[in-house]
Image (tube, helix red, strand yellow):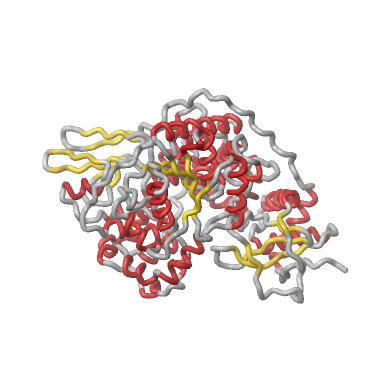
């Protein structure tokens, strides 16, 4: 099996014969397997399926061979697997310069676009306006603009930022994007039932209904035989706290910058992230027991037996990752690949176009390779305007306007969709997750979860369980035309390589300012003030934002400094006031996130050093008569 995440082989003995198929449901029915495998279901629900070469499948008595492995069948009917994809053995693993990885990534993405357009007569591209989908759209349009159709979700589900970025990109490439409005019915739950009747594995995301409509429109209205997506950009390229383990093990001098970034991203103290990284590293080196893992809010749906198997699946996955780490993998690279393997589980599908090939170039193994080879210290550069997915953004600068390539992540309409499910489809959702099929899997819907306002329904975690239930809840397999598998050549083609754009001038605050902000942060942790909204609307100020973000990240490198939005925003506002600038820490909410949120506003601009991925809205009841510790002195 090549390292292509949507490709799997399933094996089952039928008497003396070994049957092999790429379609699990068809194979299970051929050998009479009807019962869900509890271990396979637990592995799917945990998202930890990239553990070893052979895994229990979703059906009893059927095994699944994972991508990047070879299976050896012996005469005694035992099956042994061997790993054939080993990027950690590459001499460049985790040691390559940013410029080299950037050029490789862009070259290989360009090659994938060429092969996609060679194999398909007309290609649709799911285009939101965010970095990932825009980069894939650019790669396709550069090759054959007349054979590429850009489609975006209509029905006012996008954000204004997405719309502005789409318009900028379309002007740059002289292209147009077709909005696809969604029908009033059916909703998300019905879409999960429909698409899982014909997918090879359980598939589901908040956008399942939107995807189903878009794929149908691409097939029927534009005669497309493939659809490309930007799925996998966050999963593979976003810097996460796993990086701290690598830096602690190999590059401890780079830790302060990384700690500051993680503290602001998670809104916690950098000391907490450092302790977690240290515990993980001690486990990897065999000096401490495995860190504990919980199912989180998803565990609300687990019966006792499934909860136990879920914990066992997580433990096996952690042990497998430790074995790979000891062989030379970096911890952050393991996380990227583990998440890339799960990407096909939420890709678009439609019952109206079951043969449509779905292609996600950003999770192709040859595109992932430059990210795995990149030197870990390059993932936390101390340059102005640093944004997550730094490698992907640097690669995009050759094809995209910098206003698009370097724009902060803009979020999506997940919150709107989930709210609609709670208000309009809650009964259908309870019927699905309370069904006999769900009970056979091991799911148990508690009475308190029947309320629409239960915390479980405010996130996306339940979708994986709903997709698995819908996938099993089918009377018979429905044969379908398999999608074209996208594999990669061993080496990239020789292409003209544009020069890497130079980094902008660093906007670093003076050390005394960092110390002052750290002191103010501690003060506002002890004596939090009340925020007031400013009297006038403001706009983003990139230059001020870069300066304050650099200041906040460096301050968060101190152990007791909190990256939480309240003390940090109030400390920044207080710092600006001391320097003679009117500033306020504003209280509000972030779309799709529970709890209050804070950011800084001056008389002319607003700054969010935490990089919110969805829109921020001021709390309406806050008025100017509230006192504030960031009010300018008279």
Q: Residue 51 placed where, x, y %?
A: 37, 44
- Most extreme residue toward the right is 634
Q: Residue at x 72, y 50 (%)?
A: 542
In the displayed structure, does residue 345 sit left or right of residue 237?
Answer: left
- Most extreme residue toward the top is 494
* Observer able to see residue 286: no
Q: In this view of the protein, which residue sits in the foreground, 344 or 510? A: 344
Q: Residue at x 66, y 33 (%)?
A: 501
Q: In this view of the protein, which residue sits in the foreground, 612 or 508? A: 612
Q: Residue 587 placed where, x, y %?
A: 67, 68
Q: Residue at x 17, y 42 (%)?
A: 13
Q: In this view of the protein, which residue sits in the foreground, 285 or 88? A: 88
| Residue 36 in the image: above or below residue 24 | below
Q: Residue 97 placed where, x, y %?
A: 59, 31
In the displayed structure, does residue 300 sit left or right of residue 11?
Answer: right
Q: Residue 271 placed where, x, y %?
A: 61, 54
| Residue 404 in the image: above or below residue 604 | above
Q: How many marks?
A: 0
| Quarter the N terminus occupies | top left
In the displayed structure, does residue 122 sit left or right of residue 601?
Answer: left
Q: Quadrant of residue 508?
A: top right
* Observer able to see residue 116: yes
- Most extreme residue toward the left is 15
Q: In this view of the protein, which residue sits in the foreground, 72 or 21? A: 21
| Quarter the C terminus occupies | bottom right
């Amino acid at each position: 099996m090549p390292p292509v995440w949507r490709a799997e082989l399933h094996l089952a003995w039928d008497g003396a014969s070994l049957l092999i198929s790429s379609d699990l449901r068809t194979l299970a029915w051929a050998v009479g397997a009807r019962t869900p495998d509890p271990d396979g279901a637990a592995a799917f629900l945990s998202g930890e399926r990239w553990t070893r070469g052979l895994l229990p499948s979703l059906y009893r008595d059927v095994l699944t061979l994972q991508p990047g492995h070879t299976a050896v069948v012996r005469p005694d009917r035992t099956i042994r697997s061997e790993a054939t994809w080993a990027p950690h053995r590459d001499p460049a693993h985790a040691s390559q310069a940013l410029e080299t990885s950037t050029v490789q990534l862009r070259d290989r993405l360009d090659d994938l676009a060429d092969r996609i357009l060679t194999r398909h007569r007309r290609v649709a591209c799911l285009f939101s306006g965010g970095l990932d989908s825009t980069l894939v759209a650019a790669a396709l349009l550069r090759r054959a603009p007349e054979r590429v159709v850009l489609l975006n979700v209509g029905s006012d589900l996008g954000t204004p930022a997405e719309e502005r970025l789409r318009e900028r990109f379309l002007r740059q490439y002289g292209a147009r994007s077709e909005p696809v409005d969604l029908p009033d019915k059916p909703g998300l739950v019905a879409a999960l039932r429909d698409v899982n009747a014909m997918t090879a594995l359980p598939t589901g995301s908040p956008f399942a209904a939107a995807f189903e409509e878009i794929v149908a429109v691409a097939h029927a209205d534009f005669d497309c035989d493939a659809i490309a997506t930007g799925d996998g950009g966050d999963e593979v390229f976003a810097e996460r706290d796993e990086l701290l383990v690598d830096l602690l093990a190999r590059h401890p001098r780079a830790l302060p910058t990384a700690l500051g970034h993680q503290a602001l991203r998670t809104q916690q103290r950098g000391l907490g992230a450092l302790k977690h990284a240290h515990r993980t590293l001690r486990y990897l080196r065999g000096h401490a027991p495995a860190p504990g893992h919980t199912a989180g809010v998803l565990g609300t749906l687990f019966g006792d037996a499934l909860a136990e198997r879920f914990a066992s699946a997580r433990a096996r996955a952690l042990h497998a990752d430790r074995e790979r780490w000891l062989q030379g993998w970096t911890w952050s690279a393991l996380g990227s690949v583990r998440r890339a393997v799960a990407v096909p589980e939420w890709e678009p599908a439609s019952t109206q176009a079951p043969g449509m090939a779905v292609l996600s170039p950003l999770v192709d193994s040859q595109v992932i390779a430059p990210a795995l080879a990149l030197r870990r210290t390059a993932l936390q550069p101390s340059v102005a305007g640093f944004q997550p997915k730094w490698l992907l953004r640097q690669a995009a600068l050759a094809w995209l306007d910098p206003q698009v390539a370097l724009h902060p992540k803009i979020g999506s309409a997940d919150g709107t969709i989930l709210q609609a499910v709670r208000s309009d489809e809650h009964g259908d959702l309870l019927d699905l997750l309370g069904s006999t099929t769900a009970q056979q899997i091991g799911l148990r819907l508690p009475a308190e979860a029947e309320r629409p306002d239960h915390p479980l329904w405010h996130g996306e975690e339940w979708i994986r369980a709903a997709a698995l239930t819908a996938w099993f809840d089918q009377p018979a397999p429905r044969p379908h035309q398999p999608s074209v598998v996208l594999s990669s050549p061993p080496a990239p083609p020789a292409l003209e390589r544009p020069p890497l754009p130079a980094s902008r001038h660093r906007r670093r605050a003076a050390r005394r300012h960092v110390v002052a902000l750290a002191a103010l942060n501690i003060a506002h942790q002890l004596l939090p003030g009340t925020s007031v909204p400013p009297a006038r609307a403001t706009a983003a100020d990139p230059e001020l934002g870069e300066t304050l973000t650099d200041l906040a990240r460096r301050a968060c490198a101190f152990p007791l400094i909190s990256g939480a939005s309240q003390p940090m925003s109030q400390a920044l506002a207080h710092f600006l006031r001391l320097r003679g600038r009117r500033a306020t820490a504003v209280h509000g909410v972030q779309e799709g996130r529970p709890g209050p949120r804070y950011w800084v506003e001056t008389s002319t601009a607003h700054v969010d050093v935490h990089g919110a991925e969805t829109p921020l809205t001021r709390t309406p009841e806050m008025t100017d008569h509230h006192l504030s510790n960031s009010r300018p002195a008279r």
